Amino acid sequence: MNHSVNEKCACLAPESAAVARPRLPVKSVLLILSLAAWWPLYSQLLPFSQWLTYNLLGLAPQTHMGEAVAFFFYDTPKVFMLLVLVVFGVGLIRSFFTPERTRAILAGKREILGNILAALLGVATPFCTCSAVPLFIGFVEAGIPLGVTFAFLISAPMVNEIALALLFGMFGWRIALIYLATGLIIAMVSGWVIGRLHLERQVEDWVYEIRVEKTATMPELNWSGRLDYAGRAVRDIVGKVWPYLVVGIAVGAGIHGYVPEGMMASIMGNDAWWSIPLAVLIGVPIYSNAAGIIPVVQALLGKGAALGTVLAFMMSVIGLSLPEVIILRRVLKPQLIGVFVGVVALGIIIVGFVFNAVF
């Protein structure tokens, strides 16, 4: 009797040990399955959009309406899939950074090194138009030079990780790398120029008088917490930008289907020297974001617009948004606002001319 009991216990032991083994969290399993399914779905978007346009809807190929609708049906899921993947990945990276940690990295650095670090950190750290004022105050309070602060404030919106990833997905690494390099150069040089002008008196007096209370440091997250953080970033960012995204794709579809190539090349081509300053002037007051402007960029390039002109237009929309300028007015006097806009706009225009001449 005892022998059979022991045999029974021995048989149960492996099952008990198996139950005790740690299992992958459900979130990790879902993430792995989603990543495995992403590429097969992404690779079928073009044939699916063509089937939907020409077979299901019955539109004729090589017509204005057919090309516009096919562009819209292809780009909408394409951009959304790229956006979700990129925002999630960047959310994981950003879970390692806080504004406090960013200020600690920049504080006490020499100006040239500070400008380089500030521009690089601007790409990786959380930033939006609404956070311009608290970040600026925090940097001033930490004793970070004005030029270094502006290098960060320029780089953060201009070298947008969403734009970088979408450019890579749509045009390849070459154009994405051009965008990254030019954005960082503009941020570094603009920060250095503003630092050389010694415009500290053009910051509102109350900024120097305020003492920002030290906020509690974000507790160190485990991987489950980082996945939650990245998931919330996807919900928040995609939830905010999707209307702009759809409108941008619709505008791009209209350009792709209806705007003649010759007209676009004459307005934004290499021969139209005035097109670059005009593109920057048009881009500054437009309130859009990277996700909304990239489909327009794709359509403009497809119609023969020059790379430098389109790049200048995109950077002016992303890097010199009117809402950011209005919010920064709370901490900057008009002269410094004018210098900020003028230096960045001049840098964008120079980049546009250089790339039109080279490419």
Image: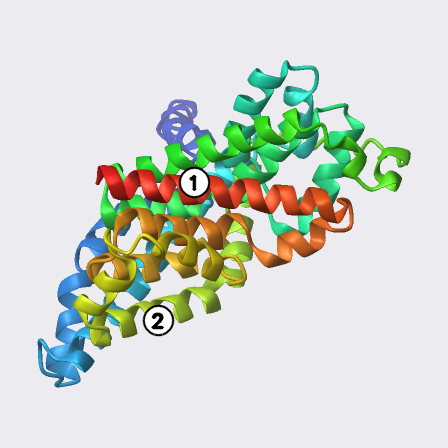
In x, y percent, where is residue 88?
Answer: 45, 45
Q: In this orientation, does residue 211 appear?
A: no
The answer to whether residue 146 is above or below residue 326 is above
| Most foreground residue, 339 or 210 | 339
Q: What residue did someone put label 2 on?
A: 251
Q: Please tell me which of labels 2 and 1 falls first in the chain.
A: 1
Which residue is most to the bottom? 58
Q: What residue did someone put label 1 on?
A: 89
Q: Amino acid at mark 2?
A: Val
In x, y percent, where is residue 67?
Answer: 17, 74
**Left or right, 168 with reference to 91:** left
User: Is disc 2 surrounded by few (<14), some (14 to 19) or many (20+) residues within 10 Å?
Assistant: some
**Residue at image point 28% right, 63% down:** 267
Dividing the picture into quadrants, the one containing residue 214 is: top right
Q: Amino acid at mark 1?
A: Gly
Which image quadrant: the N terminus? Answer: top left
Q: Nearer the viewer, mark 2 or mark 1?
A: 2
| Most foreground residue, 347 or 229 | 347
**Left or right, 245 with reference to 214:** left
